[in-house]
Image (tube, rainbow, N blue to C red):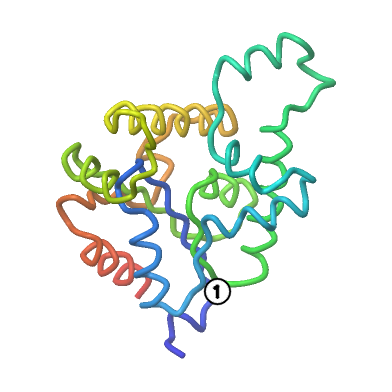
């Protein structure tokens, strides 16, 4: 086991859609010998929240600002929306995992959740130019019948709204991260090299 993987290390990765968050996390995982979590959150969150995996996949890192406004209008104190309950469960999962093992966590406001809890970690933000993100999104083919450009814009918008609602911060603000990397210019491997060099 390397010196890096023998220490307790938590890396959080926030990312624009199509910037290669999962690709970088997977490469980092192999390089450092650390598990990485993205969609693995679903089963753990389902067990804590009582919501189905389908519901969590639908709402786990997205929220419509209009829906949240309506929820607050109906009952700002007594009523907890499904998105709120899922976020609370995901927060418990993130904190539990971070205390238990070294790992890489993608998205879900993990950077600020860990910061608030006083848990040391390296927070990374990944972004890329429009051309790179369009190409990557086409490879992922998650847009169904929706125009790819509109799909990317919608994913970004919902991710930003989710981050704003649950942290009060603006998504992508460099103040929230230790390092921001342009995957389109640097490449996934280059980003992994930089992150591993920072860890020493």
Vertical relation: 183 (above or below) 170: below
> Is residue 116 found left or right of 51 in the rendered image?
left
> Quadrant of the rendered structure where residue 56 is?
top right
Vertical relation: 94 (above or below) 59: below
> Residue 152: x, y in percent?
33, 33
Residue at numbered disc 1: 8
Question: What residue is drawn where x is 69% and y is 40%?
Answer: 86
Vertical relation: 15 (above or below) 197: above
Vertical relation: 130 (above or below) 33: above
Question: What residue is drawn where x is 34% and y is 45%?
Answer: 141
Question: What residue is drawn where x is 63% and y is 55%?
Answer: 94
Question: What residue is drawn where x is 26% and y is 65%?
Answer: 194
> Is residue 79 found left or right of 13 in the rendered image?
right
Extreme residue in the top direction: 73
State how many labels appear: 1
> Residue 62: x, y in percent?
53, 34
Estimate how packed mark 1 is, as few (under 14), some (14 to 19) or many (20 or more) residues with alpha carbons within 10 Å: some
Placement of the C terminus among the 4 image quadrants: bottom left
Is label 1 in a helix, a strand or a loop? loop
Camera-side residue of 147 and 159: 147
> Residue 188: x, y in percent?
25, 61
Extreme residue in the front direction: 145
> Is residue 25 found left or right of 50 in the rendered image?
left
> Quadrant of the rendered structure where residue 131 is?
top left
């Amino acid at each position: 086991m390397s010196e890096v993987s023998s220490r307790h290390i938590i890396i959080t990765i926030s990312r624009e859609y199509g910037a290669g968050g999962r690709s970088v996390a997977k490469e980092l995982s192999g390089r450092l010998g650390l598990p990485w979590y993205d969609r693995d959150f679903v089963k753990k969150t389902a067990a804590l929240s009582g919501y189905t995996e389908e519901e969590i996949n639908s709402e786990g890192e997205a929220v419509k600002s209009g829906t949240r406004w309506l929820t607050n209008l109906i009952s700002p104190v007594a009523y907890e929306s499904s998105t709120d309950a899922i976020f609370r469960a995901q927060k418990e999962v993130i904190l539990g995992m971070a205390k238990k093992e070294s790992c890489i966590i993608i998205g879900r406001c993990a950077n600020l959740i860990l910061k608030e809890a006083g848990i040391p970690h390296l927070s990374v933000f990944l972004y890329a130019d429009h051309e790179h993100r369009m190409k990557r999104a086409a490879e992922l083919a998650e847009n169904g019948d929706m125009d790819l450009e509109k799909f990317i814009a919608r994913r970004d918008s919902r991710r930003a709204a989710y981050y704003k609602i649950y942290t009060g911060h603006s998504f992508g603000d460099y103040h929230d991260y230790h390092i921001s990397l342009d995957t389109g210019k640097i490449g996934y491997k280059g980003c992994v090299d930089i992150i591993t060099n920072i860890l020493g």
